[in-house]
Amino acid sequence: MESDTGILRKMCSGPATRGIAAVAAPSFAVHRRTAVQRCHRISALRAAAILFAFGAPLLGCSAGASSPPAPPPSDEQRAQALLDPAATLPPRAEVVALADAVAIASSRAGRTERGATLAMLAGDLRARSFRLDQAEADAREALELYAASASAAAGALQGCEADRRRALLAGELARDAAISYRETYLASRRQAVLAPRTPCHVALERALAMASAYRPRGGALRALEREGDFASEAASRGAPSPSAFAASPPPSGAVSPESAPPSSASAAQAALEGQVVVTPRDATAAKEPVKIVSLEPFGSEKGGRVVIHLSGPTTFQVGTLGADAAAGKDARVFVDIARASAKGVRRETEVGGVVRRVRLGAQEGGGTRVVLDLAASLYRRVFYLPDPFRIVVDVSTRPPVRKDEQDASGKREVRRVVLDPGHGGNDTGAVGPTGLKEKDVTLDIAHRAATIVSRELGVETMLTRDDDTYVPLDLRTARANAFHADLFVSVHCNASENGQARGPMTFSLDRVRDPEGLAMRVAARENASRPRKTGEEGDARSIDEEMALIASNLDVGDLMARSRHVADLVQRSALASLGVRWPDTKDQGTKTAGFFVLVGADMPAVLFETSFISNPDDEARLATADYRQKLADAVANAIRAYREGK
């Protein structure tokens, strides 16, 4: 077990070097739909090495005297060997592939002792990779793997050790000894309940004593002690341990945003502090009372979203409250909605995952407070969407600001992708001249693309819908965020009024820059997937301008620029894939518009209009398996190109 002193020392050191790979890592794939499918393949390099090592001696022996060759080492054995301090690590991509293979085995083993062991092994490997290359993605994955191990082995020595390693790594990632103290303190409080007086718990107490200089004082200390009380209580209730995955927790003090949206710079700064809030200008909000029509909650273990639907525009303010163990209260995010009533809406709704429940309460002066009870302090983004007006509250264990990380060779890490088949259920989307429905075409293309992305690229893939069901636009992005996706591709079929337009077109989120107005009409059609009442269509141009303003204030980490790059890759890939078989394919180019389904995505996100289903020739092609497969190939090739740094 590496000493705490050694780990703290590494926080001050620079990245080390990495050796040349001796053995190629196995490739693997995950395609998550209704079930998870995975396959492992031994690389040709390893096969050749095995043949060289064992084939020649066998040829010189008689059949009776031969003995079977020793089997190649397992993924678990290879991972353990690479954790030897004297071992030279192969290139990072191979280490990541090996760690992922061990993590998959851990997931298969479930919440068992073996599952916990494998999760910690994979976490150790990612942590060592982080300490060499300083790739933050490695540290974040290690934190999650340690948390999974601690949860699976809660109450055992191994669970305590996973919690301890997670706490120290959190400080390393933040490069802040105060964070190390905080996380170690919370781990100590948890393990005082789960694994008291074990060698691991003693090590936690010793680490706290060593870092006493970084112990907070005054109100900050009292707040930390209250959080420790909450951690102890949660552990005694059997709650997952640790309860949060964020390396540097966001502040828990109340925040009162300005009425006008923040600038891009202030939004980025707010994101670094754990919260982004975009509210409407007072001038655009109605002054008369409004009604909360419904709540649309979604929760998972890594994130959640609550959409508050209102009868009209209004202003709101956002605040947070830390957990109060003495009062039995969870960490909370609240939204105070001015002049809003909630008659007929349930006062309390159980959700699940990191969002325990949503509560509503009336305020003096005619407003309503909507409260999200959280499993831990989380990163927050709160914004609104117009026509129909709604407030979106996003919470996540993943920080909103993440760099476009590329390794020395320019490659990007793409571990999870979400494919979004447009429309579904009672929302058929566009319908072609012969009756071909957009919802059926997009689902088939997404299924085909998911198979390629998962099996050939080894990327974990999720579909926002797996069958002919209606999924609200706001929920599609919420699922991608909670999945911690690295890319989001929404698949659609285009349509025009006269049926003459043809060819693929790809969109990213921004204001319309199309002088012909086609992009605006496409966005208006796709955004109308949500049923609306007569007279609520609104002015398309003003909505687009408002959507662009919202998007720009949510644009942390240059997401809009990165999304435009992905859109360009998808469009070029589509033309290359279709052009050989159908050389008359028309290039409709890449465009920008204010699509509801793309707003709020915390990863690069694009909308791919595969072809015009309203055109007889394009519809006939979209009806064939060959054409759909070429479109699926285009999506997969674009993801491959993005991962390779193109």
Image (tube, rainbow, N blue to C red):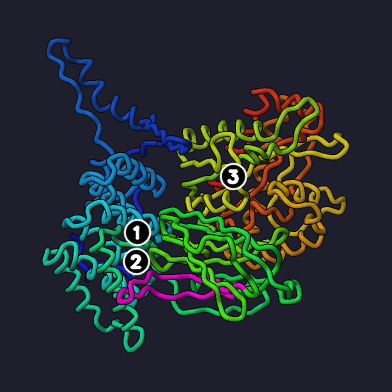
330 up-or-down from 425: above or below:
below
- Distance, label 3 to label 1, CA atoms, is 32 Å
Quadrant in the rendering for residue 363:
bottom right
Residue that numbered label 1 is attached to = 143
Report the label total: 3
Among the two numbered marks 3 and 1 on one chain, the one whose residue lies closer to the N terminus: 1
- Distance, label 1 to label 2, CA atoms, is 7 Å
Quadrant in the rendering for residue 13:
bottom left
The three-letter code of the residue at mark 2 reads Ala
In percent of the image, x 60 and y 53: which residue is there? 474
Among the two numbered marks 1 and 2 on one chain, the one whose residue lies closer to the N terminus: 1
In percent of the image, x 49 and y 41: which residue is there? 461
**Disc 1, SS:** helix
Which numbered dot is residue 412? none
Residue that numbered label 2 is attached to = 170
Residue 148 visible in the displayed image: yes
391 lies left or right of 433: left
Q: State yes or no: discs 1 and 2 in contact (Cβ < 8 Å).
A: yes
Q: State yes or no: discs 3 and 1 in contact (Cβ < 8 Å).
A: no
Question: Residue 620: x and y, percent?
Answer: 75, 24
Q: Residues within 10 Å of mark 1 (few under 14, many from 20)?
A: many
156 lies left or right of 280: left
Which numbered dot is residue 471? 3
267 lies left or right of 549: left
Q: Which residues are magenta?
A: 317-337
**Disc 3, SS:** loop
Q: Residues within 10 Å of mark 3 (few under 14, many from 20)?
A: some
Q: Quadrant of the N terminus?
A: bottom left
